[in-house]
Each structure stands twice: as structure tokens, then as C-alpha cells.
Image (cartoon, rainbow, N blue to C red):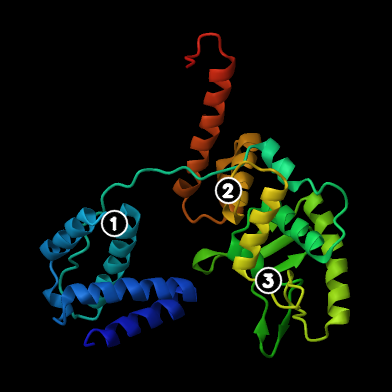
Amino acid sequence: MQSEPSIQAYLARLATERGYSPQTIDSYARDLRLLASVAAGRPWSSIDEAGLRRWIAAQVRGAASPRSIARRLSCWRGFFDWLAERGEITVNPARGLRAPRASRRLPKALSPDQALQLLSAHGTPDSFEAVRDQAMLELFYSSGLRLSELTGVDVRYWRDASGESVSWLDLREAEVTVLGKGGKRRTVPVGTAARQALTAWLGARERLLAACPSADGRALFLSRLGRRLSNRSVQLRIKRLALQRAIPADVHPHVMRHSFASHLLQSSGDLRAVQELLGHANISTTQVYTALDFQRLAKVYDDAHPRARRR
């Protein structure tokens, strides 16, 4: 494909200069190859705004989500800017285009009572998986980590000839440092309940390492075979625990993150602090939790106010 060298050069720039993750690079590659199919073998300079508008219209007719269209246009705008810097085009045809407005979906969050019910271990966890899973749940809710951030955490900071840790736990200081989206690193507190659960897990982890010398000595969360726990395994474990503890909601790791943010904002009212703890680049991303808080207030009003409208 004639366009492939340009795509590969741009992706290399994103990886080296912007520090984008492999998953983000793969997403950009798919979007740029879709753009190449729009060009249909012609040079990039042949793509104009009218052609892209026709593409957007066709996507809307095909019921593509506004979010997907917006993501692709964002990718293409950056790519065309790069082509312009290289002198391959004179005008960015995607610069003035916007995707159809997406409906605003509020993130799902557990109520505080549901969160406490989920975190209740119903006695002292005794099995290897039970101790580990309780520590994962507590760390999710305590620190608001993303799924990939949690599975990427090392048991402690390390550095040697092969490299160094990018995410690590410091239980003595009650904090965890993670590498988030866009290569942005942040350090967040670990609460008392999470510290207790992690202390219990570290004991079980040491016993596993003693019995399995080939186990990964760096990863915080391990499978019974001694491997770093995968994202998919964590998703399944969290869902299973929610079912076992009778939570009437589809619970996945991001629900824990949303619950952390919503409950912290309800208690503190400090939107900027919640933004920093979540690792959001823009506060507008965090402001969605103010809508969640208003929903809670509206429900209290409807349930309690004598003049509230009731069905």
C-alpha cells in the first residue's frame, strides 16, 4: 500500500515523541488504515473536506457511534497536521470537521452501601485467591486505579540493567505510583483497609514465591501459577465476587474507579483533587462526576421533599 510508509513513520513518532502505549498505537494504526481506504490509493493531498463530510454522512447512516467517528477524526487531524509539517499537503481537510454530538452517558457507580457490601469479606479470607481478590478490590476502591494500572503494579520499585519499574507499591508510605494514559505518572494514597488487605496478600504471595521459584517476583498480583495477573482474569474475578456478594449491578473494574471518584467527590466537594487522583488531563473529564452527585441529590429530594413530584 502506497500510504503505508507515511502511516508507519507517523506511528513511530507517536511512540517515541508522545510516549503512546502499544494499545493506543494499534488503535491509531487501524484508524489511519481506514483513512487510507478513503484515499483509495490516491495521494494524501487528494483528500478534501467535502470527501470527509461524505464519509461522516455515510458513517452516520450506517449507525456508527458518534464517539467512534470523533476518535477517528481526532486521529486524522493529527496525521494531516504532521503531513503538512512535512510539506506533503497544504491544507488539513479534517481541521474544521466535527463528529455528530454524542449523547452524554454517565458512568455507572455503586452506591456507598453497595460498595461496602462488595468490600465486605464476610470473615477472614483464607484461600490464596480470596486473599488476593480482596486486596485487588480494596486497592481499586481505595486509589481509583484503572484496570491496566492495577495489573501493571510491581510489588516494589526496582531498577537494573534491563530497565526499571514503571508502576509500584510503597506500602510503608501508603501510596501507589502508576503509569496512566499518555505516559502520565501519578502517585495516589492507599487507604487503611487497602493496606491491611495488601499486607495479608503479600504474606500469601511470599508463600507462593517460596513454593514456586519460577514465579514472577516483580508483579504485585499473581496467578496461582506465579504469572502476573492478566486484565481479563481480574475482570472475571471482580464480576464473580460481585455475584457472590449479591450486588445488583454489573460490576467491573471501571465501576470501582467510578465509585471511588463519585464517593470522594460527594464527601469532599473538591473536583480538582479528584481530577489529580484519577489522572485526568482535563478537568472537563472529571466534571461528569458532578452530574452523578446531582443525581443522588435529586433522588434524596424526590424521596424526602413533601412537594416533590412522585409517580
**What's the residue at 65%, 63% (across, down)?**
234
Find disc 1 in the rendering and name its residue.
64
Mark 1 surroundings within 10 Å by alpha-carbon count, few (fewer than 14), some (14 through 19), many (20 or more) = few
Circle 3: residue type: Leu
Which of pointers 3 and 2 lies earlier in the amino acid sequence?
A: 3
Find disc 3 in the rendering and name its residue.
229
Q: Nearer the viewer, residue 13 or 116?
A: 116
Circle 1: residue type: Ala
Find disc 2 in the rendering and name its residue.
250
- Tell me the distance, in whole angstroms, between the alpha carbons under discs 1 and 3: 34 Å
Are the residues tagged 2 and 1 within 8 Å (C-beta)? no
Are the residues tagged 3 and 2 within 8 Å (C-beta)? no
**What's the residue at 87%, 48% (across, down)?**
123
Which of pointers 1 and 3 lies earlier in the amino acid sequence?
A: 1
- Tell me the distance, in whole angstroms, between the alpha carbons under discs 2 and 1: 25 Å
Which of pointers 2 and 1 lies earlier in the amino acid sequence?
A: 1
Q: Quadrant of residue 15?
A: bottom left
- At which x and y percent is residue 173? 80, 60
Can residue 20 be seen here? The reply is no
Q: Secondary structure at mark 1?
A: loop
- Tell me the distance, in whole angstroms, between the alpha carbons under discs 3 and 2: 21 Å
Tell me if 196 is positioned left or right of 48 in this view.
Answer: right
Q: With respect to residue 310, does 94 lie above or below?
A: below
- Viewer-side label of 2, 1: 2
- Viewer-side label of 3, 2: 2
Quadrant where the N terminus lies? bottom left
Tell me if 160 is positioned left or right of 259 in this view.
Answer: right
Q: Residue furthest top?
A: 306
